[in-house]
Structures are given as C-alpha cells and as structure tokens.
Image: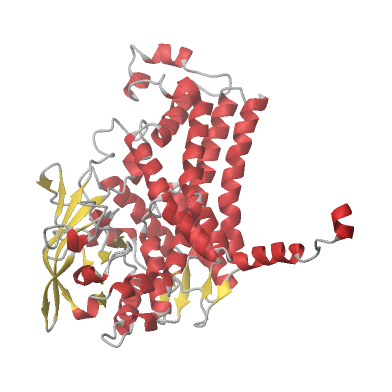
Amino acid sequence: MRTGKQYEESLRDDRCVYLNGERVKDVTRHPAFSGVIRTVARMYDLAADPAEDMTFRCPETGTCANKVFMIPRSREDLQARRCAITKWAKISNGFIGRGPDHVGSFFAGFASASEVFNTPRHRFGPNVERFYRKLVEEDLYVTYVIIPPQIDRSSTAHAWGEELLQVGVLEERDDGIVVRGSQMLGTATAVSDYLFVSCIKPLTSDDERYALSFVVPVRAPGVKVYCRRSYAMSQPSGFDYPLSTRFDETDALIVFDDVFVPWENVFVYRDVNQLRRQFFETPAHVLGNNQAQIRLITKMKFLIGVARKIAEVNGIDAIPSVQEKLGELASLAAFVEGMVLASEAECIIDANGVARPNPRFLYAAMGLQAETYPRAALLLRELAGGGLIQLPSSYKDLLAEETRHDLERYLRSPRLASEQRVKLFKLAWDIVGSEFGGRHLQYEMFYAGAPFVAKNYAFRHYGYDEAVACVEGFLSSYELDEDSACR
C-alpha cells in the first residue's frame, strides 16, 4: 500500500503547473498546493494502516488493494466500499471532492465491463483492464477532464472556426496518437498522478476527431496545468481559514500541446457513440457518482454539526423557529444518506456479476444536489447571522497584548470562551462566505453538470412502469355506468 510520503515524493517530477503567470517548481512546497497534498498524504497513510481495515485482496491483481478501488460484486462489497470511502471523506469532512477514490471508482466500472471498449474497429478492452490493474497496484491518484472548454456552448468543437480548441487528434502514429487542444475542469490535477481525458458532453458525427478517451501522466511532455486562483495562499492562518488552507483542490484548465499518447493508454478513438457507452453501458457512472454521494453525506453532516453548535453557543437552540431550521437541515442530510443506503440495499447484480447501486435512488439524490447543498449552506448562514462578519481580522488580534483583553471580554458567549467562539465562526465563514466556500457552492450545484442534466439521470432511471401501472390498475377498477355515476 502506498504511503503518504511515497505519494508526496511522486509529485516531484517536474510537472508543468502554472500559477500567477509562473511555472511552479515543486508543488509539494508551494503554499497553493502543500495543504491539500498533506491532506491526501493523510488519506494514503490511513489506508495503509492495517488497523483501519481499508484493504482487501483484489481478484483482478492478486494483491492487497484499497477498498475504494474495489469492483463490488455483492451488497456486502458495496457496504465495505462505502465504509472505506467514508473514512477518507471524514479526513476533509467531505470538502475534497476529487480524491483518488472518485475517478478510481469510474475505472472500477470501466474494467468490470471492459468488453464495452471492444468494437469492430478497435479492441481497447485489454487497455482498460491493464490500466485498472496499474491503478490498483500502484494506488494511483487519477483525476479527469471530461468537459470541453466553454468557447461556444451553442455548438460543438467542429463548428468553432478553429481546429483543436477542444482536445483532439493531431496525428496518428504506429505507436500511438498525438493530441492537441484543451479540456476542463482539472480539479486536483496539479496534485495527481494521471489524468483521464474524455468527453461526457454529447458530440455530433462531425466531432469524430474529438471523440477520445485516454490516460496520460500529469508529468507527460506537453501537458500544461493552468490553475485558477489559489484559496490557500495569502490566508493569515489555518485558524482563520481552516478549510481553505487544507482542502483547496485547485481546479485548472488543461492544455495539451502536442502530447503523445501510446496506444496502450487509449480507450476510445474517433468514436462518438463509444464516449457515451463507456459511461452508461458500464457501471462507471453509477459507481463514480455513488462515491460522490457518499462523500456528500459526510459534508452535509459536517454542515449540520456546525449549525447545531452555533445555535447552542448562541443560546437559540430552544427557539421553535431555530429548531425548524435545524430540522430542515436534518431532513436534507437524512435524504442524501437515505438515498445512498437505499441504492446499496436495493443494488442490482448485472450480467457481469457486478453489484451496481440502484440508480433510482442514487440519481434521486444527485438530481436534487443543486438544491440540497445550497439550501443547507443558506440555513447555516441564517443561523449564524451577523456573527459571521463580526470577527477579528486574524488570529493575531487574539494574541496581541493590546487587543486580546477586549476580544476575550466582548466576543465570548455563556457557553464558549472567546477563542473557541471565534474559531467556530471562522470555520462557518470558510464554509459559506470565503472564496473557498463560494467555490464549493458552485461545485456542488454543477458537480454533475447543469441541474437539468442531473435531473435527467433521475428521469431516465426511476422506472416509471411501476408508477404508471398503479394508475392504470386503479383506473381500470371502475367504469362509467349508471351505478358508478351515482356514487
């Protein structure tokens, strides 16, 4: 099992990461990335600890492996996988959305139905199986970019007036392909090992050049990572911004400047139909989103915990209107958790013997994610009130001889000393008011694409036959006749 130290050392590979107009020499030592790297290292160390029970004997490799990468073949496997994912999520309280377990779950789904990647033109199934084994054996951190750049949302890449703005094929060679273009959103790419590149947005038959799926090392020549503004840098301390400084994943635009990809790392090539099949005719989409919802459970519980504690500290937890808000928060969190547990309990064993979380319940939670998380954040904001903005400028105010006595006297509460009260409200502000918090609001709203896309998954997978049959059965129980008309 990989250790945190081994993970950190693997990132010192001269990868091409840009921030603030400069190339980052070493991401492990840069303040924009060092916090989240330390957090991911803790995740690897936790998984490597035998006492945590996060490993299993992987039948695909014959080696000891992390349960988060498991191909589940029973309800019990899904439960074991959920427990492992939850242990990782608790390290960041659900605020690392693209940890190694996310795309790792997609590859478990790909590999469990590798025959989908075999077509009359190409047999890429063995490539998928080979990379999954590599991922499991080396405990790799794989992230993805599966959305085209937002150059023109009204059309697809072939109609943009300039070739290879979206990543596409520049050259085909005997030993592989050369790609050029860009793709988004490279969440955590700067601190990961490999990048899975594909497109989940529907393309047209004219976009064949862009219909690709492949993996490439982040350090590969020609891969450029253009990070957004860091929320970890320039913060006064971890006390003032406890989430920003530890869990900022740093999203990025990824540019492929004539990057060579060997055939063994290609999974889909110039095949528009295959792009969709890889996600939805394998368990990949449902397993990847199951991981995301398990993580969201942890995050929602954390928000509720902060809200409940603030209400208690402020002495308002006995007020009926406050209890109503706390009750609504409890309902939102229980809904997400209940749908995940239901999808697990009612799992479906597919033709390959893979246990798929029931999509009726999984996509129900995902379909309302753009409403549940913003609502939870708003309720937390309302419960905290003006206390969120009446805070010291930094931790230094609590230490300086000239200022600390006033703050000790006037920022205390009957149930909490001033330092602990400020600490709690600083945490709440990082959730709902900081740039980090704003990014997470945006992330959860659009994690699965536009809200109508997420709800469309629920529409397609609910299974309306049962509901319609209930209605039709009742309609057939009575007729228009003189007796019924009189009733």
**Front residue of 453 and 204:** 204
Q: Hey, which quadrant is residue 6 in on the image? A: bottom left
Residue 485 shows up from this direction: yes
Image coordinates for residue 354, horizontal then vertical, percent: 51, 77
**Front residue of 27 and 288:** 288
Name the residue at 54% across, 56% down. Answer: 364
Residue located farthest toward the bottom when viewing the structure as drawn? 120
Image coordinates for residue 103, horizontal then vertical, percent: 36, 64
| Relative height, residue 478 to residue 382 (above, below) | below
Tell me the colour scheme of the image.
Answer: secondary structure
**Front residue of 123 and 410:** 123
Residue 52 shows up from this direction: no
| Relative height, residue 204 to residue 391 (above, below) | below
**Front residue of 113 and 413:** 113
Image coordinates for residue 188, horizontal then vertical, percent: 29, 54
Name the residue at 39% across, 56% down. Answer: 43
The N terminus lies in quadrant: bottom left
Judge left or right: residue 46 versus residue 22. right
Name the residue at 50% across, 18% down. Answer: 412
Judge left or right: residue 355 versus residue 266. right
Judge left or right: residue 209 versus residue 127. left
Image coordinates for residue 42, horizontal then vertical, percent: 38, 54
